[in-house]
Amino acid sequence: DLEASEQEGREYIMHLDKMAGIRKNRAALAEWAYTSNITKENEDNRIQVQLEISQQEKLAWEETKMYRWQDFQDFSLRRMFKKYSQLGVAALPNDKYKQLMLSISGMESNYATAKICAYKNETKCDLSLEPDLTEIFAKSQDPEELKYYWVEWHKAAGARARQNFTEYVQLDNEAAKLNNFDDVAEWWQSEYEVPDFEQQLAKIWENVKPLYQQLHAYVRKRLRDKYGEEVVSARGPIPAHLLGNMWAQTWNNIESFTRPYPDKKEVDITQAMQDQNYTSLKMFRMSDEFFRSLNLTAMPEKFWKNSIIEKPTDREIVCHASAWDFYDGEDFRIKQCSTIDYEYFQTTHHEMGHVQYFLQYKDQPVVFRDGANPGFHEAVGDTIALSVSSPKHLRRVGLTSGDAEDEQTEINQLYKMGIDKIVFLPFAYTLDLFRYGVFRGATTPDDYNCHYWRLREELQGVEPPVTRTEDDFDAAAKYHVSADVEYARYYVSFIVQFQFHRALCQIAGEYVPEDLTKKLVDCDIYQSVAAGNALSNMLKMGSSRPWPDAMEALTGQRAMRADGLLEYFRPLHDWLQAENQRTGEYIGWESSNIQYC
Ligand SMILES: C=C(C[SeH])C(=O)N1CCC[C@H]1C(=O)O
Ligand SMILES: [Zn+2]
């Protein structure tokens, strides 16, 4: 009868979940070994382990079909079975599975080991993306030098990945179909468990776009003032290589010469960190201390022993920052190639947020040890970093002596946050709108680069520094495209982190709507146990409930909405409108004169 089989089902799934934890631990160790020491031997071992594990997953998957779990009464039990009833890429036959793994690791190792020759010194050809090109893009104000490095990187990391990428699309779509999805786009979106996910993304963009266009217009004017009409036009897109970042995804590196009130005290946190002899370990210790001040969990001993927080000198590794759960309840790690600057100070909090989530849900069944949705996982660390980057907190830790808040300083502060958070949204939206089209077959290989730039121009208002053709494949010059990492998670994160931040600030008594002494922009939840407990209650849930339940637990809202972000940046939006009116700057952009289709 149903009762017995539900009890049998419970015993079975708890056993299967335990076995899954052991498999995931083994897979993570093999992947860590490879990405922290890129050798052919470690790549072969990683693929061998993934193949063996996929066999075991197939057997377990066959067994779950013996239970009529759809009729079970217990919500959690049904949810566990539902998740285990989806096999994933292991549904591919062995040879195709192996081919898919090879095409992805081929792209990822190409990206991680790509070396570029120095500008005006063709004999020095050992420059890496991290830290070399990243530092050049942060500091150089020479359009020709930036153009050179932009072109070389997109050749080495983008064009060279086109063949593997085309194969990956084909095989990953086959895996999607074996999981009863039309294509990978539908598979990725199923992670968000809402039927109108893509419409929600579009709605949010409509809400944020007016603010973005004002910020884009202001920045374009300031760049035109600096580089001249020949380099930056009055009404066209902004050339992508002038924005302080290889992908123009955040523009914080051009703050020093574009901020609204340049005569107000300069808040150069990178300089302050270097003057105070910050180390990578100090950044991690400070972040860990912030989480502990909220009554959240301290990093365990193994974390400090096993993490890699600086680029090794004796081997090649995947430098792109990552956080790792080894699913044994005690081994959690971060791998990143830290440099001592504001950007990596933020990244450290971002990655520590992932590990805090791992720690908070470590007692859930393995299958629920995940973010409520992928965007939630990306939002934890950033939410904490919103407090850390407030003038109040930076003064508390001695990173700025910034004068008391006045109107102009507040606009400078909101501008600094806006060129990080607002400008990121159209970039993130573009990356997965592009890949949705690719997976659906709407964008074919002979259109890949043209479609990519058409979207970037339409949504982000940027253009490539030089003509592009289909010999290029610029999308893969971004880590997540070369590493098969879905990107809508960051778009979701940059929206929900402001809903989380607002809720936490109210709980901490740091933000009181209409009370001008308790503004959202000044909020710092540091040492608020009440805020920490509220955050912990949401994080402990992992993916055991649909994400609207988790969102409601913390914010009282059940939907992701732009209102948190728009409320935070309201004063900046008003200022930008007035400023662009004053200068007569054209809002928006006409089509580019650069040939790319
Ligand atoms: C820091 C990570 C690792 Se999950 C990352 O990839 N991020 C963090 C913000 C956006 C995105 C990027 O770098 O493109
Ligand atoms: Zn992340």
Image: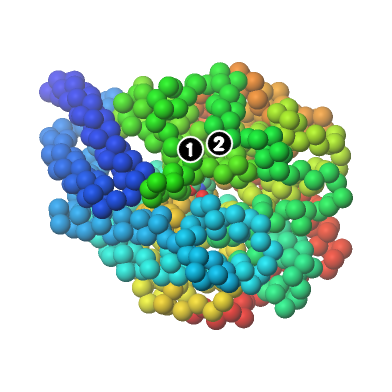
What residue sits 36% from the left and 43% below the top? 36
Which residue occupies the foreground of this view, 409 or 301? 301
Q: Which residue type carries mark 2?
A: Ser
Question: Residue 268 — which label?
Answer: none
- Quarter of the view holding residue 586: bottom right
What residue sits 63% from the left and 48% below the top? 421
Q: Where is residue 496 in the image (x, y as percent from the top left)?
A: 56, 41
| 575 horizontally vs 394: left or right | right
Depicted 591 relative to depicted 23: above or below: below
- Quarter of the view holding residue 290: top right
Q: Which quadrant, please, contains the N terminus? A: top left
| 242 horizontally vs 26: left or right | right
The colour scheme used here is: rainbow
Identify residue for label 1. Answer: 309
Contact? badges 2 and 1 (CB < 8 Å): yes
Residue located farthest toward the front when viewing the structure as drawn? 123
| 108 horizontally vs 586: left or right | left
Q: Position of residue 238 (x, y in %)?
A: 66, 68
Q: Which residue type carries mark 1?
A: Ile
Which residue occupies the foreground of this view, 161 or 120? 120
Question: Residue 280 — which label?
Answer: 2
| SS under mark 2 | helix
What residue sits 50% from the left and 60% below the top? 127
What residue sits 31% from the left and 59% below the top? 106
Answer few, some or many: residues within 10 Å of disc 2's Cα (few below 14, many 20 plus, some between 14 and 19): some
Number of numbered callouts drawn: 2
Q: Position of residue 590 (x, y in %)?
A: 66, 75
Depicted 411 relative to depicted 437: above or below: above
